[in-house]
Image (cartoon, rainbow, N blue to C red):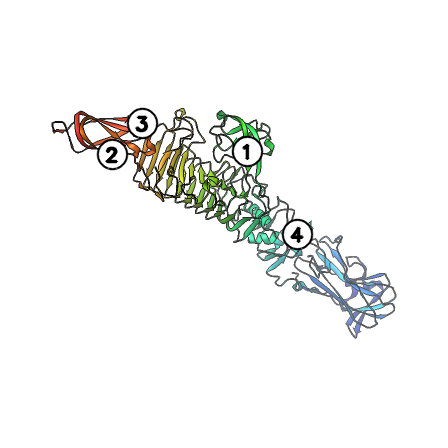
Amino acid sequence: MTTGPLTPAPYSDGLAAYSNGDGTPGSPSYATSGTGTFVPADQDFGGALEILKTSSTQRLRYKGQTQIEPGCYVQVKVRVKAISGNLPSVRIAAYAAQANGSAIPGVVTTGATVALTTYGQVVEVSAIVGIGNRSGVDMVWGPSADYGHFGIDLLGQNGGIVRVDDIEITDASGLFLDDLIATVDVRDYGALGNGVSDDTAAFEAANAAADGRTVLIPAGTFRLNGNVTFDTPTKFVGTVTMPTEAVLLLRQNFDLPNYIQAFDNEELAFRKAFQALLNNSDHESLDLGGRKVALTGPVDMKAAVPDRTCYETRRAIHNGQLIALTGGDWDTTTVVARATYSPTNSRTLTNVANIANIPIGSHVTGSGVGREIYVRAKNEARNELTLNGPLHDAAGTQNFTFRRFKYLLDFSGFDVLAKFVLHNIEFQCSELCSGIMLANAGTIFTVRDCFITTPKDRGITSMGGGCQGMFIERCQFLSAENDLPVSQRTTIALNVNANDVKLRNCRAERFRHFAVMTGQNHLIIGNHFFQGDAINGGIRSAGVVIAEAYASCVFTNNYVDNAFLEWTNERDPSPAFAGGFSFSSLDVTSNIFLSGDVSTAFSFFIIKPFGEGHFVNGLNVAGNRFRSINGFVERAERVDTSYADLNFTRMRNVRFEGNSFHGISSPVANPHLIEMTQATDQQTWVVETGPGLPFEARSLSVDAVIVRGGVRNAANQLNFDNPFVRAQQGTDADQVHVVWSEPVRGKIAVTARMDNDVV
């Protein structure tokens, strides 16, 4: 707003201040021109300037400089009447000046023209002048304006005489702003809002001038070709357009609703707000404001931030819903291509045909390909694809199928994304798409208190190492396959490849698998997943698949409902004697395992070895509750021998105790306590371990033989000798022979083991 008086000095102070030129220094004045005289006592005006019109455009300009400032609009008013001669027309006119005094090119410098039709009739002409392009502003001068010389033009035939009242210039800003103190308008700083002209500089200038006041972006479409940062609150009535690489940062209004107002497009606003999040040190999170963002296709999160390939500072998105719209770009990209695999180069496909059309992040299937194998990178020059894991039995050349699922949020373009959090968001996949694709690498990605609802293919996918140390906590995974039999389900809630994942307190319903987990040192705690169907005697699928032989994993306090825990080595099928620990370091404790209406062959815990020679070398199964309702099952645990059996002669450090069994035909324990009564005198007692050892294993060793009430020989005398034992006896190695010094009879308790506890 301007300060000081605006209205020029009256004519009574002298006519030297009034020019019949453009009003600039050196232009002629009415004091010397001979065409203007001062009339001291006009009946309508008091003091007045009387002008004889001698030029086709007779000018009157005040030589004083009237300042033009952002946010200030001046109104120029002049009253005129014709005295005699030809009747002219009149209009407000001005000289528009830049700070150096030169004229501003290309701007309007005249107001509306009004004809004088009657002698002695007072006619008022007026015009409003300012920097901003507002409705009602007659002369828009733009941000380069500094001051003006104001007055009138007399148009038409010469020879007429008119009298002109003192020029009145006033501040008219109040006509445009309700509260000048609280609001700064970008138009005041030269923004045009025509959708074509670059208004970046005007937005930056408005921000600089705001000093805590709200910046108003009025109706219109404002093109911003460069980065714009607002350090002050903003109010968007109009909208902005920007190139992809340009950043709009709303530091005082950093939430999605304000970006939606700015861009008038939820999808675009989400991308631009995410871009600002990763280019902003002031905010660690983007609040979706409870908004539902409708998406017509996957959000390529890397493409939204073209200046970043890696980001490792904590950032979060929270509090809203993302929903896939029908008719959007959700179709899976499917490519069938011939390629060669060699176990010696276990994460690479070579000689890949049609490699240019295979997207990174594609899911790979083919003969000998395990679960959740994805394309992590590609080298088109060498026709090679890098996979996220080895294949178990795919040596040679074959056709592989590559399917690139579409995800609501796709982070796969980032080389590294670390410490990123998604919190309190529903991913409404609508059976059209998948949920989240992680970056190629990165640590501590977190998904907390989220719903992933009805994904078409996957909930959360890790194609590489972006899951290192990941947290998945208190999330709901709701399947789109509720009504399908287990055998027809294909969706998977999540997978991981790297180490140290915390999967805690989640709930998942009726997926093919809840989680497929490679890597080590995972904590799987407090989850509830159920995968049954309405088929009596039906099959069930694995809820959690631990696809790493050396697991170093804790699986505790989970509710496993009509599903099972599967432990495999499908990513490393090499024989155990080739090195490594084989199936090692898994803790399965204090879980609820429940099934109903299942096949009698169903088991709750399955080990599935790929390759010969594998054994168990560190397993603790304790304090679990195994229960089958509406029909018994044979065993709670078993070995799936589809590819190979375990080597039961090498079992080490297995604890299987303190569990409860209900509706299970063969409860098991290790160590397994067997009580035997020998009714006839025998020197070698044969003790059958039967089905009581886990996995129907061998009786590999014996911890103890305890005599119950004494043993007696043929003479009915007590025998106090200490017997010795032979383990792994019988054709199935499931017998223990207790050998005495003489034939005896009696009762003993034998503690047999499936493992050898010697380290």
Label 2 crowd bin: few (<14), some (14–19), many (20+), radius 10 Å: some
Nearest-to-viewer mark from 4 and 2: 2
Judge from the rendering whether residue 582 lies leftward or rightward of residue 681; answer left or right.
right
Tell me which label, 2 or 1, sits earlier in the chain: 1
Secondary structure, mark 2, is: strand
The residue tagged 2 is: 674
- Using the image, tell me which numbered label, if any, was put on residue 266: none
Give the image location of residue 246, x and y in percent: 62, 45
Secondary structure, mark 4, is: strand
The residue tagged 4 is: 222
Judge from the rendering whether residue 20 lies leftward or rightward of residue 342; answer left or right.
right
Label 4 crowd bin: few (<14), some (14–19), many (20+), radius 10 Å: many
**Callout 4, which amino acid?**
Phe
The residue tagged 3 is: 732
**Callout 3, which amino acid?**
Asp
Tell me if label 3 and label 1 are in contact, CB under 8 Å: no
Relative to 703, is 118 above or below?
below
Judging depth in this view, the residue of 468 and 60 nearest the camera is: 468
